[in-house]
Image (cartoon, rainbow, N blue to C red):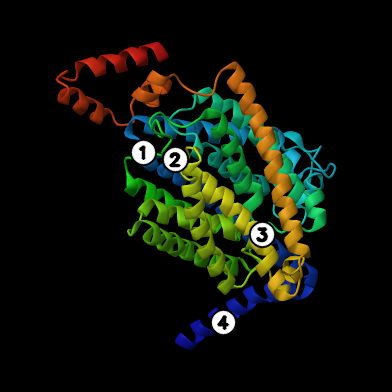
Amino acid sequence: MRRFVLLVMAALLLVAAVPGVALAQDTPVVQGAETLADVALAVDTMWVVLAAMLVLFMQAGFAMLEVGFSRMKNVGSVVAKILAMMGIGIVVFWAVGFAFTFGEGNSIIGTQGFFLSGDEATYAGLAWTAVPISAKFLFQVAFALVSLAIVWGTMLERTKFAVYCIFAVVFAGLIYPIVGHWIWGGGWLSEFGMQDFAGSTVVHLSGAMAALAGTLLLGPRIGKYDDSGNPQTIPGHNMPLAVLGVIILWVGWFGFNPGSTMAAVGQSFADIALTTNLAAGAGVLGAMLMSYLVKRNIDVGMAGNGAIAALVAITAACAFVAPWASIVIGFVAGIIMYTVLLLVDKIGVDDPLGAIAAHGMGGIWGTLSCGIFATPELVEATGFGQPGLLYGGGLAQLGVQALGIIACGGFVFIASYAVFALLKATIGLRVKPEHELDGLDISEHGVYGYSEQLVATDYQNGNGGGTQAAKVRTAQETAS
């Protein structure tokens, strides 16, 4: 009986298998190839969307970094600004910015694809990657938001909230997209072969130049410089939060740089992640060394900015350089950042976050480093530009990189200065002195970021919590 049951089961299995075998024999080979292509596309799309989410999460890093380096009375205004910039930036870039950056057009600006309309061919600047246009947009809008976030690092604790909102529309809708089109969208610098794999110039230098323009017109915070013009330290209120912000940005950069392959199958994104990580570590060491040489101690804030400066610098070169070169690039970036930050402070430019030194000079050094360290093999593999100076490429690529820095940095600074000057002449850039002294949380948003601290301060002043609490209620009622 047992043998009979086994024979019946074997016969049933054979009958069930025959149609599958016959179908497999009749199915054309091309069907299998299409299936593999679909799987590859799905993997690529998943990678790009994941990378986009990592880059988007960098906004949390900027929020914590800015909160940590701000005074307690301004932290609510910082997080409100971050949320507003995300909302404005996403919508404006969807409406016009993405088309200006990657749409078909001329060598200066894209002219097609507004409101994410049209097919894949409309966005010629991204035709090299096969992922859906929705994934391309998600990734690129996250980049635009990073550049916009950089603008405000120098203008904390004294800027009107309306200025943030108005400038965000112009920057995300026009200024940033023009630079992006020049380098990434098939514009004139792309035709010259400029190397900027993930945006040392497009994202970071652009944000820093806009920040410099706004800061020059805005002026320093009250109390930053004494009567003789000597800079005074205005410490942030929470260094652990600032370091948390640095670490979040560091992790987010694994979407920023490796994600710029905009594909996973057949791409060397792990190698790009390696150069990114090595550079960041070396940047911390470079900044720590400078801190010890100058102050004979290790400044935690400077060490964090060293990591950021190095990450900014390797962003352009991450796909073009060997691991050893990424360490050199990151270490030098940490040194440059520290030196420039001290210089900026001395000449009267109040930059609470060090964004000009980290993102501006880091972007310049990183862009130039491509013309020095780019290897022939990686340049050939990526199809961008020529090898660097150390590999027999001569000064050609270095010259193209310098041209891109001057053109993009100059354009963003002039355009941003014009917009900020117009805002200063109309609505004004700066809050009233009494509002700056009291903190922007109440004057701009009607609520403190740390309400418990407010109550504690009232009791210390003998007010029993009543006077300041009444001010808060009045401000909230006025805002509503």
Q: CA distance from mark 3 to mark 1?
A: 33 Å
Q: Secondary structure at mark 1?
A: loop
Q: Position of residue 281 (x, y in %)?
A: 46, 64
User: Residues at badges 2 and 1 in contact (C-beta under 8 Å)?
Assistant: yes
Question: Which residue is the site of mark 4?
Answer: 10
Q: Position of residue 57 (x, y in %)?
A: 49, 47
| Above or below, 444 relative to 312 | above
Residue 233 is left or right of residue 400, and the answer is left
| Above or below, 448 relative to 476 | below
Q: Position of residue 162 (x, y in %)?
A: 53, 23
User: Residues at badges 4 and 3 in contact (C-beta under 8 Å)?
Assistant: no
The amino acid marked with disc number 1 is Ile
Tell me which residue sits at (75%, 39%) in the image: 100
Question: Which residue is the site of mark 2?
Answer: 352
Front residue of 179/38: it is 179
Numbered badge on residue 234: 1
Front residue of 4/72: it is 72
Please count the marks in the image.
Answer: 4
* Circle nearer the N terminus (2, 3): 2
Q: Secondary structure at mark 2?
A: loop
Numbered badge on residue 304: none
Extreme residue toward the front, this view: 228
* Circle nearer the N terminus (1, 4): 4
* Circle nearer the N terminus (2, 1): 1
Question: Which residue is the site of mark 3?
Answer: 368
Tell me which residue sits at (45%, 52%) in the image: 305
